[in-house]
Amino acid sequence: EAGVAQSPRYKIIEKRQSVAFWCNPISGHATLYWYQQILGQGPKLLIQFQNNGVVDDSQLPKDRFSAERLKGVDSTLKIQPAKLEDSAVYLCASSSPGTPEKLFFGSGTQLSVL
Amino acid sequence: AQSVSQHNHHVILSEAASLELGCNYSYGGTVNLFWYVQYPGQHLQLLLKYFSGDPLVKGIKGFEAEFIKSKFSFNLRKPSVQWSDTAEYFCAVSFSGGYNKLIFGAGTRLAVHP
C-alpha cells in the first residue's frame, strides 16, 4: 500500500516569499490533515479536511496560510508571505473512514525561512 | 484548553534497561489516547492506542501503555529496550466531539546505547 506522499522534501526561502506544499493521501482516505511541527515541539494541527470540506482550521493563521483540497484527494498548503517563525516541518496525514482515529503520516516538508 | 504533557524530553538508556515514558493530559471528558513513534529518518507511525476497555494496552514491538483515568495519565512502558528502539516518542490525545483532532505532546527523544 502506497503511503502518504509529500513534496518537496526540503524548501529554503527568504522571509516574505511565498511557498506551497503538496500532499497526496493514501487512496480512499477521506480525511486529510496538515500539521506543523516546530523543532522541539510536537505536531500541531493546522487544518483538517473531510473529503473536500474543512472540518477544523481553528489554528491556521489565516492571514498568511491557506489550504485547499480540490476534488477531495490531494491537497496544497500555502504560506504567503512567510515569516521566520514559520520554519518547521509540515506534515500531512490521512485516515480512512473505517479507522478514522488511525493517522498515516507522510515524511513531511522541512521549511527553512531565512 | 486541552493539552498534553510529556515529562521527559530526553532519555538515555542502555540495552535491556526498562523504559517508562510519562504522559499526562488535561481534559475531564472522554478521551482517546495514542502513542506515536518516529524512528530516525522515518515518518510518524502509530505504536498503540486506547479507546475503552482494559486500561492496559499492548502495542507493537513489546510496548505497552496503561491508562489511569484518576491521574489523567497514559504512560508508555517496555520491560527491556533494544538499540532499535532509539526514536522519538509522542503521546497524543483526541477528545470527544473533536473530529479525531489529535493533540500531541512535545515528544521524548530516546537513545538506547548497546
Image: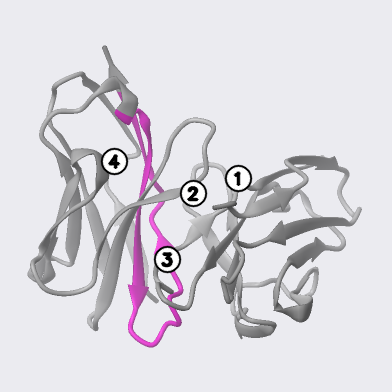
Pick whichever, A37 or A21, lies toward us.
Answer: A21
The circle drawn on residue B103 is: 3
SS for dot 1: loop
Residue A111 visible = yes
- Chain ID, mark 2: A
Pick whichever, A64 or A7, lies toward us.
Answer: A7
* Range covered by the magenta-colored residues: B85-111
Q: Position of residue B86 (x, y in %)?
A: 35, 28
Label 1 or label 2, whichever comes before in sequence order: 2
Mark 3 vs mark 4: tell me if same chain.
yes
The answer to whether A82 is drawn above or below residue A71 in the figure is above
Residue B27 visible = no
User: Mark 2 — residue?
Assistant: A41
Pick whichever, B58 or A26, lies toward us.
Answer: A26
Q: What is the three-letter code of the residue carrying label 2?
A: Gln
| Mark 1 surroundings within 10 Å by alpha-carbon count, few (fewer than 14), some (14 through 19), many (20 or more) | many
Q: Residue at horizontal 79%, vertical 54%? A: A83
The circle drawn on residue A107 is: 1
User: Mark 4 — residue?
Assistant: B8
Residue A23 lies in quadrant: bottom right
| Mark 3 surroundings within 10 Å by alpha-carbon count, few (fewer than 14), some (14 through 19), many (20 or more) | many
| Mark 2 surroundings within 10 Å by alpha-carbon count, few (fewer than 14), some (14 through 19), many (20 or more) | some
SS for dot 4: loop
Separation (CA) of disc 1 from disc 2: 17 Å
SS for dot 2: loop
Q: Residue at horizontal 24%, vertical 39%? A: B61
Separation (CA) of disc 1 from disc 4: 24 Å
Residue A85 on the magenta span: no
Residue B57 lies in quadrant: bottom left
